[in-house]
Image (tube, grey):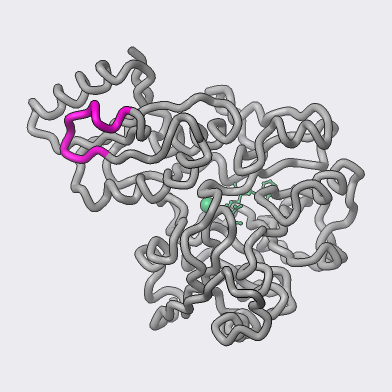
Amino acid sequence: MKEFTTNIWSVDKESDSLSGHPQIIQASLWIKKNEVIAFPTETVYGLGGNAESDEAIEKIFAAKGRPSDNPLIVHISSVNQLEGLVADIPKRAQLLMDAFWPGPLTLVLPKGERVSRRVTAGLSTVAVRMPDHPVALELIKESGLPLAAPSANISGRPSPTAARHVFEDLKGRIPGILDGGPTGVGVESTVVDCTSEKLTILRPGGVTKEELEEVAGESAVDPALTTNESAAPKSPGMKYTHYAPDAPLYLVDGSSAFLQQLVDKEKARGRITGVLTSDENADFYDADTVIPCGSRKALESVAHHLYDALRAFNESEADIIFSEVFPKKGVGTAIMNRLEKSAGGKIIKE
Ligand code: TXA
Ligand code: MG
């Protein structure tokens, strides 16, 4: 792999107009040369490359160390770009686009002839989304190309919600990062399959099941997400270990007192302990590192802080981390999906 000096290109996303912004032009020049750069979206930072170039796609997989059977999401700035990208737009997909784009919703549609097989990992479908972030939209416009982009982390690590997270993971591997400040939602987009008989949620995310159903009627959830059976998930990425801090993380389904007992036992064995908690319970715990990640009264705040909190444990030298669980409703479904993955399924019940 080529070595780069990784530039940080700062852009104030609140500017009145980003049209012709010199840093965005810089980034787009690399895209047009089929190199890959990182950019902010409203969910997490993406690692973007020309979706029509096999060369660019290969560089994305190499920089991330991503398994090649895991397809990428194609990002667009205008619905006109769907031409050639998708073969058909079913009615309910149209309704969802009208309601949620730009926004944290990815639609899986029949693939068009212009998409590289490397993007879709050989599937007959393609995942597309229009991000709700002025820097992302301007970058796509300026490049004049749809951008294939996975989250801009090394595979297996928590997704990046700030430019410094991308730098930690990818410095030297990419020519630059467009820094648009911290992302908003904090967990990735909801991925829905619009090609199956019933609308099917393949990955819970920023748009909730309740919100989807208001627009497109009843939906199903990929059974691989809710059962422990070894059913292969329809979204290939869901089968890998993900979002993991360096130390093992255990989910604790029980009271704070029970979680503290687990901490005390580990401390007695000489271990450095970490606790991931809601703001409400932060003062209760006595551990080497206690990281509050938002309020139970506003699960959106937990989603926003989650990945930064998981990364922060790597600086704490914790040997073992215990995490509270959150209610699986609204964006809580996405939070728990990510936490279950970072725990690799390890859960302790009181
Ligand atoms: O919020 C997001 O979606 C972020 C930002 C950067 O847009 N992107 C992101 O990409 O999370 P990534 O590559 O980390 O996750 C993409 C997910 C994976 O689980 C992948 O398997 C699934 O989407 N996916 C992509 N194409 C698919 C397809 N044709 N059918 C089913 N699942 C697909
Ligand atoms: Mg990812």
The structure residue drawn at horizontal position 48% and vertical position 73%, both measured from the top left corner, is 177
Which of these two is toward me, 112 or 160? 160
Q: Where is residue 42 in the image (x, y as percent from the top left)?
A: 59, 56
Quick check: 100 left or right of 267? right
Residue extending farthest front: 16
Number of disc labels: 0
The structure residue drawn at horizontal position 39% and vertical position 68%, both measured from the top left corner, is 167
Q: Quadrant of the N terminus?
A: bottom left
Q: In this view, does 200 lie above or below 94?
A: above
In which image quadrant can residue 30 be found? bottom right
Q: Position of residue 235 (x, y in %)?
A: 64, 42
Quick check: 286 left or right of 336? left
Q: In this view, does 83 lie above or below 94?
A: below
Which of these two is toward me, 66 or 273? 273
In which image quadrant can residue 32 be found? bottom right
Q: Is residue 3 visible?
A: no
Q: Position of residue 233 (x, y in %)?
A: 62, 36
Q: Quadrant of the C terminus?
A: top left
> Does the magenta segment cover residue 285?
yes
Quick check: 49 left or right of 250? right
The structure residue drawn at horizontal position 61% and vertical position 71%, both measured from the top left corner, is 49
Q: What stretch is highlighted in magenta?
A: 281-290
Q: Where is residue 212 in the image (x, y as percent from the top left)?
A: 75, 36
Q: Is residue 251 above or below residue 126?
A: above
Q: Can residue 90 be seen in this view?
A: yes
> Does the magenta segment cover residue 237?
no
Q: Is residue 306 above or below residue 47?
A: above
Which of these two is toward me, 89 or 24? 24
The structure residue drawn at horizontal position 59% and vertical position 74%, both measured from the top left corner, is 15
